[in-house]
Image (cartoon, rainbow, N blue to C red):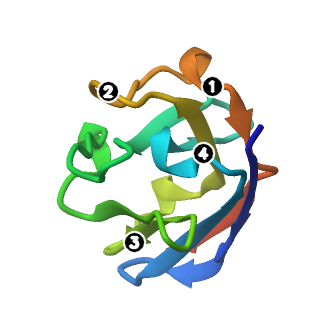
Amino acid sequence: QVQLVESGGGLVQAGGPLRLFCAASGRTFSSYAMAWFRQTPAKEREVVATISWTGGRTPHTDSVKGRFTITRDNAKKTVYLQMNDLKPEDTAVYYCAATPRPVGLPPMSRVEYDYWGQGTQVTVSS
């Protein structure tokens, strides 16, 4: 069992940075693939970035490549999403997700994730 708590969301001007945090509880965090998803009222929940348990594989969705970076610290049981050059279209509720995946690429589909946080709101003003 893994519990996830996101933080770091808020209001930021376009072009600015923001860093999201996802604190996990549970004994086997290091064998879990982790991900950030986002959702707006008008769109389905979409993947932003994922990370393997070693941190060595970090697929990002095309719209955030070069601007967002996912990382993790297994000793602290925390996953981060560094967001730079934010745009109004990045406005959404951001969710942290986890799934057991000791080998292979971290999944990019939300249906493959077993555990979810409550979400944190990110609002980018133009």
Q: Identify the residue at horizontal 58%, vertical 44% (top origin).
A: 38
> What number is the disc on residue 44?
1
Mark earlier in primary sequence (3, 2): 3
Amino acid beneath label 1: Glu
Gap in angstroms between the C-alphas marked 1 and 2: 28 Å
Report helix, strand or loop for mark 1. Answer: loop
How much space separates mark 3 and mark 4, taking CA atoms? 24 Å
Q: What whole-number distance in Å separates the C-alpha atoms at marks 4 and 2? A: 14 Å
Callout 4 touching callout 2 (CB < 8 Å): no
Point 33% across, 75% down: residue = 84
- Work out whether residue 125 can be spotted: no
Q: To which residue does mark 4 refer?
A: 28
- Going from N to C along the chain, the mark reached first, 1 or 2, is 1
Secondary structure state at the residue bearing disc 2: loop
Crowding near pointer 3: few (<14 within 10 Å), some, many (20+)? some
Classify 65 as above or below 45.
Answer: below
Q: Determine which residue is flagged by label 2.
A: 103
Please provide percent x and percent y for residue 82.
Answer: 39, 71
Label at residue 96? none
- Disc 3: which residue: 82
Select label 1 or label 3 by which is in front.
3
Q: Which residue is drawn at 68% across and 26% down?
A: 114
